[in-house]
Structure formats: C-alpha cells, structure tokens
Image (spheres, grey):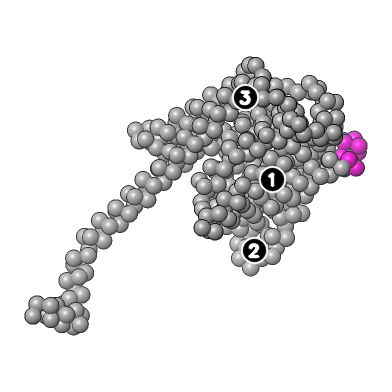
Amino acid sequence: MLGDFMPFLANSLVQLGYAGMNITSKLAMESGMKPLVLVAYRQIFATIAIAPFAFFLERKTRPKITKPILFQIFLCSLTGATANQVFYFVGLANSTPTVVCALNNVIPAATFILAALCRQEAVGIKKASGQAKVLGTLVCVGGAMLISFYHGHTVGIGESSIHWKYAEEMTSKSSNNGSNFFLGPFLVMASAVAWAVWLIIQGQTSKNFPAPYTCTTIMCFMASIECTVIGIFSDHKISAWSLSSSIRLISVLYAGIVCSAVTYCLLCWSIQKKGPLYVSVFSPMLLVIVAVLSWALLGEKLYVGSVVGSILIVGGLYGVLWGKDREIKEMKSNELETGEATLGKGGGKDDLELQLHDPQAKGNHQAGAA
C-alpha cells in the first residue's frame, strides 16, 4: 500500500511545484522582470542546487567525461534548457498560466512525431496501439490549434472570494499590456517541440553517460551561460537584473531550486519505481491545479475555446499514453512467448540428459515405476 502511495504523493507534489512556478513566474514578469532574465537566473540557481547531488552521489560511479559526451550534453542544454525555457517563459509572458499548461500537454504527441521521423518509434498503424498514438496525436494538435486561434465566450464560473492584494495590483497594472494571444501559444508549442527534441537526445546521452545528476549539472551550467548571454543582449541594464523585489527573488529561487533540483530528484525516483509512463499520466494534473489557482489568485477568466481545447489535449494525451502502454505490453508478451518457445524446444532434451546422467534422477524414476 505504501509502495503505491509514495510515488503518487511524489508526482502530485511535483505537479503542485510546477503550478506554483507558473504563478510566481507570471507575477514576477508582471512586476517588470524580463522572461529571459528569469530563465538565466533559474539556470544559475539550478546549477548551484544540483551540483552537490552530483558531487556526493556520483563521485565514485561517474564515467569519464569525454568530448563526444560534452557535445551531447551541450545539445541537451540548447534544446532542453535554453530553447525550451526561453520559449516557455516568453510564451507565459504573452499568455495565461492555464493556456500555457494546457499546451504543454502536447509534449508526448510532439515526441511521438519526432521519434517516428527519426525512426526511434514504430508507428504500427495496423495495430490498435499505433492507431491510438496517431489519433491521440491528431487530437492533441487539434486541441492546441483550438486554444491558439479560438477563444469564444467566457465561462461563467463567477469570481473568486480570495483577494490577494499584491496579485490584484500586478494583474491590474499589466492587464492587456504586452500580451499577444497568438504569439504566446505559438511559443509554448515551440517550447514543447524543443523539449521533445531534448527527450530524444537525452535518451541517447543517458545510455552513453549514465550519471543523471552530473549530466544535469553540466547541462544547467552550460544553459546558464547561454541564457545569460541571451539575456544580456536583450536587456543589459543593471536594473533589469536586480532581485531587490521580493517576488523576483522568490520566483527565481523557487524555479531554480524547487522546480529544477527537487522535482528532478523526485521524478528520477518515481521513474525508477514506477516507470516513465506512470509519471507522464500526472501531467494533466498541472493543468487543473494551475486553472484553479489562476482563477482564485490572479482572477484569470476561462474561455470556451480554452476549456474545449484543454479537454481535447488531455484526451489526446491519454490516447498516446494508452497506445504506448499497450505497445510495451505487446512487446513484453512477444518476448515472453519467444523465450518459452525456445525453452520448450530444448527442455525435453535437457530432461532426458538429466535422467541419463543423474543417478538420483534415475533412482527416483525407477522408484516411481515400482
């Protein structure tokens, strides 16, 4: 019982942590913090937070770091850290937390498309598992398009009775200021594609360099340099990099330590215990949590297009996951049948040889005949 509850609790806490990051980051950007500056600080604090894990947990088991390994980690930093988070946070600055979290659920579909193009994933359109993956991907993309291009009427759920004065002041100052309801969703989808590319590269990197904490530390360190350079080019004023505001400091510390170091440890542990598919199923929970918090704390309005699109994305996500789960079970079943067939062919001969050469077996056989 406890063995099933702890992974559930860990993944729920991860999604709650990510939800908090979306809210605090949105408030920090509405207070005037540039998204590129926020991303740079996140990578810096993430490097500092993860480095002790790499040093103490992997100093005896860490493989040799070669130039090809460094190049692969560099590609991981460009896709999974820099491109993914730059697109994500700029998209968040031009959209709402709920829309961003909804679109982030297209990652499994984007990963499936890229993996199929790279021939790392079998489509298997003639099987139910392959049909579920393809159909789920199409539904995900359709939901993402609906959120991006259609809003419709607001959903009449009333206003929240919770009044957070600071959040109300920030949202009123930034209301309709700099938001772009097409650019935001587009950049978030670009972020999902970058993350999908990272998953494919990281899969190969993990095989060549099985030291996840060291790999993540190096990746975050490289990304901190990349993001800092990009941030300085976008805004080199010292005031833009100031963390004197409490919400800015809380946002970068929270994003770097909680949402990079702590959540990464929890996800690694959960994947080890239950597998990656189990972890993926919790992704839609983030959408629900953020939608409730955004409505309650930020006064965010929900639109018909956002609600219907979110439902389509979540439905498509589970379609892809179901297809992948069934495919894995079919592969294991085929491997088991192949192994039993091989064992059956050699089993009779082995038993006969055992009876001919083992005196105890021969005696038992004679006793049984008597």
Q: Magenta region, mostly helix, strand or loop?
A: loop
Given the image, on which type of amino acid does mark 1 rest?
Gly
Mark 3, secondary structure of its residue: helix
Residue 19 on image: x %, y %: 69, 40
Q: Which residue ends up furthest to the left in the rendered image?
A: 370
Residue at point 43%, 38% (across, down): 323
Q: Which residue ends up furthest to the front in the rendered image?
A: 161
Image check: 122 left or right of 90? left
Which residue does the numbered mark 3 point to in the structure image?
306
Is residue 130 something one can see in this rendering?
yes
Is residue 68 something one can see in this rendering?
no
Q: Are marks 2 and 1 in contact (CB under 8 Å)?
A: no
Residue 157 on image: x %, y %: 67, 25
Given the image, on which type of amino acid does mark 3 rest?
Ser
Residue at point 35%, 35% (across, down): 127
Mark earlier in primary sequence (2, 1): 1
Q: Nearer the viewer, mark 2 or mark 1?
A: 1
Q: Residues within 10 Å of mark 3 (few under 14, many from 20)?
A: many
Q: Nearer the viewer, mark 3 or mark 2?
A: 3
Which residue does the numbered mark 2 point to in the structure image?
58
The residue segment tinted magenta is 236-245
Which residue does the numbered mark 1 point to in the structure image?
17
Mark 1, secondary structure of its residue: helix
102 falls in the magenta region: no
Q: Residues within 10 Å of mark 2 (few under 14, many from 20)?
A: some
- Residue 347 picture quarter: bottom left
Which of the image's four quarters has the C terminus?
A: bottom left
